[in-house]
Image: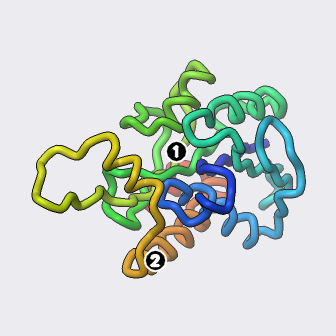
């Protein structure tokens, strides 16, 4: 079985935030695959299905972003998931808007949701699909972006100009997940990175 976790914050108020692009991608993928989030397990909304002969559990942790690891770790144990079969989809400030990057392992680059997962699992060795949300433009030309600026930025909604590149990225992430499931990680990295 594969576990695919999209990261975000639960609740309508966060639904369209930049930080919730992991949820957005997983929702789109689930809809394309005919999988409904009709169960609550491991502090997450989950949907179970089969894609190209592979059983999958899709999960949206309901712990809030900074505690995503609690949910992901519970689900890894519940479904007895090998870390090579865990895919985490999340936003990334350091990638240009709409760019996606796939890789296995590596650090969190300061992403608190990924940090929580690596801490709870005691390992960084899982597949990540990162979606670029860009960095905030600070009025006044200050070279330093504060933690408060970043929090405000990631918890704000995409602008109308950003919606097209993000919509395209969500479609590409769905294709990339399908590629990982049917052709493997290397093929997906070659096609989508």
Element on which disc 1 rests = strand
Between 190 and 145, the residue placed more toward the observer is: 145
Residue depicted at x 61% and y 33%: 67
Residue 78 in sight here: yes
Residue 119 placement (x, y as % from top left): 55, 22
Task: Identify whether 158 is placed above or below 94.
Answer: below
53 to the left or right of 61: right
Residue depicted at x 66% and y 59%: 26
Between 184 and 76, the residue placed more toward the observer is: 76
Task: Name the quadrant of the C terminus.
Answer: bottom left
**View extreme (top): residue:** 122
Between 79 and 53, the residue placed more toward the observer is: 79
Task: Name the quadrant of the N terminus.
Answer: top right
Query: Residue 128, labelled with which disc?
Result: 1
Residue depicted at x 32% and y 40%: 147
Residue 157 placement (x, y as % from top left): 47, 66
Badges 1 and 2: C-beta atoms under 8 Å apart? no
**Which colour scheme appears in the figure?**
rainbow
Of labels 1 and 2, earlier in sequence is: 1
Element on which disc 2 rests = helix
Disc 2 marks which residue? 163
Task: Identify whether 12 is placed above or below 94.
Answer: below
Q: How many labels does the image show?
A: 2
Mark 2 crowd level (few <14, some 14–19, many ≥20, 10 Å Cα): some
Q: Nearer the viewer, mark 1 or mark 2?
A: 2
Alpha carbons under labels 1 and 2: distance apart: 22 Å
């Amino acid at each position: 079985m594969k576990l695919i976790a999209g990261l975000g914050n639960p609740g309508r108020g966060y639904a369209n935030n930049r930080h919730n692009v992991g949820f957005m991608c997983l929702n789109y993928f689930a809809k394309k695959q005919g999988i409904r989030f009709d169960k609550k397990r491991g502090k997450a909304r989950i949907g179970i299905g089969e894609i190209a002969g592979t059983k999958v559990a899709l999960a949206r942790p309901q712990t809030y972003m900074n505690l995503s690891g609690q949910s992901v770790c519970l689900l890894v144990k519940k479904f007895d998931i090998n870390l090579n079969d865990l895919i985490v989809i999340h936003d990334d400030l350091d990638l240009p808007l709409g760019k996606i990057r796939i890789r296995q392992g590596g650090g969190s680059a300061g992403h608190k949701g990924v940090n929580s997962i690596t801490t709870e699992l005691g390992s960084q060795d899982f597949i990540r699909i990162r979606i670029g949300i860009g960095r905030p433009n600070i009025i006044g030309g200050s070279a330093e972006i504060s933690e408060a600026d970043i929090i405000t930025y990631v918890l704000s909604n995409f602008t109308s100009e950003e919606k097209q590149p993000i919509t395209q990225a969500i479609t590409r992430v769905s294709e990339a997940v399908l590629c990982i499931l049917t052709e493997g990680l290397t093929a997906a990295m070659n096609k989508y990175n």
